[in-house]
Image (cartoon, grey):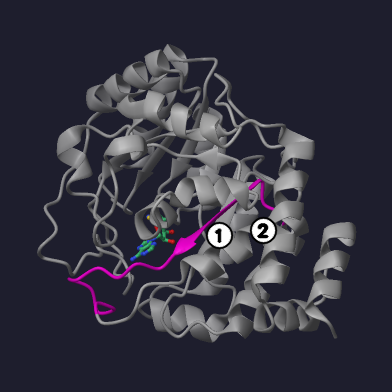
Amino acid sequence: MNALQLAETLAACHDLEASQLLWLLEHRDPDVSEYLRKEAQAAAQARYGNKVFIRGLIEFTNYCKNDCYYCGIRKSNRQAQRYRLDREDILACCDLGYDLGFRTFVLQGGENPWFTDQRLTEIVRAIKEAHPDCALTLSVGERSRESYRRLKEAGADRYLLRHETATDSHYQKLHPPELQLSHRMECLSNLKELGYQVGAGFMVGSPYQTLEDLVRDLRFLKEFKPHMVGIGPFLSQHDTPFRDFPNGSGELTLFLLSVIRLLLPETLLPATTALGTLLPNGREAGILHGANVVMPNLSPEEARGKYLLYDNKLSTGAEAAESLELLRENLRKIGYEIPVARGDSLIAPDR
Ligand code: SAH
């Protein structure tokens, strides 16, 4: 096999078998990477034009009942200063975001039982009532099918739940025994069946990850066909069990963004905060490798310093929603604009 030929096949057919993907990952070099980058950027532009969609990210609580080994807001981290925003705080973030031009809000948080279905559906209803022209995305982890159903009925449009890794044994190395890949996958298929636009994804370079694991992630994505795919480098957090593991590779993350864009040309692909934290101009690099979404931080100032999933997490400068003009300017320099729009996926919801 020849890596450049495989890259050409991927660009033409939007598919490769597992063994071919593995070969491509093992034999990536600057020529292959640049070829895929160009093809991925062109594939995104052919479908979404020179537009980058923005989502206002509201990190509304860092209380979490889970203990994921990689995550800075895991329950065993006694150093984390816990907080939760109430409905009024969240609505104020949305109002501010709306004025800035956001038409999608993402409520992300730890798995916090305080946010019962009752409380969360009230928040969802209030946001949709205040901003009926906006899309609302939830990213609050694993819940029952009934809970997902209620939230959908209350008005939630989209749900982000990264699968984290599609390899069972690897999943178990990243999470305590009470968290199971099979349950994560069940949640993802429930979300899809309920008609959400769904985001899956994984960290690049998480501890113990092999290229074979990444190939399983890519094959899973190709088959599951999420409306959005969130990937970013693993970044270590100094108060977690994974404190001594190295950060994931920026080069491999960018390579995978291009591969994912070509496998799923119509998906929404964010250039994530983690990528922006790892690489200077990481978000722009992500866009040039086929990404078409950025998620600036709309959380209130006090919350930003506390939602620390990993060390050095960016929340200021072009990463902050208030600095939208700076982001706009940075993207304009590479030929992109930010529309005032919901920015729905071209992939239709399941129902
Ligand atoms: N509780 C929600 C939101 C989790 S935080 C949920 O379970 O979906 C959002 C994402 O941040 C996670 O899915 C994970 O992939 C990523 N993340 C967490 N810790 C990280 C770290 N140390 N480095 C990079 N990404 C991390």
Q: Bounds of the magenta span?
A: 225-243
**Residue at 40% from the left image edge and 68% from the top image edge:** 234
**Residue at 54% from the left image edge and 19% from the top image edge:** 340
Can you see residue 43? yes
The x and y percentages for residue 280 are 39, 53
Task: Name the image quarter holding the N terminus.
Answer: bottom right
Sequence order check: which comes first, mark 1 or mark 2? 1
Q: Which mark is residue 258?
A: 2
Can you see residue 163? no
**112 sits to left or right of 38:** left
* Callout 1 crowding tier (Cα within 10 Å): few <14, some 14–19, many ≥20: many
Does 267 sit above or below residue 118? below
Amino acid residing under circle 1: Gly
**Residue at 33% from the left image edge and 54% from the top image edge:** 111
Q: Which mark is residue 201?
A: 1
222 in the magenta segment: no
**Which image quadrant for residue 185?**
bottom right
Q: Does the residue tagged 1 have its C-beta within 8 Å of any atom of ligand 1?
A: yes
The x and y percentages for residue 78 are 10, 65
Amino acid residing under circle 2: Ser
**306 sits to left or right of 64:** left
**Which image quadrant for residue 323?**
top left
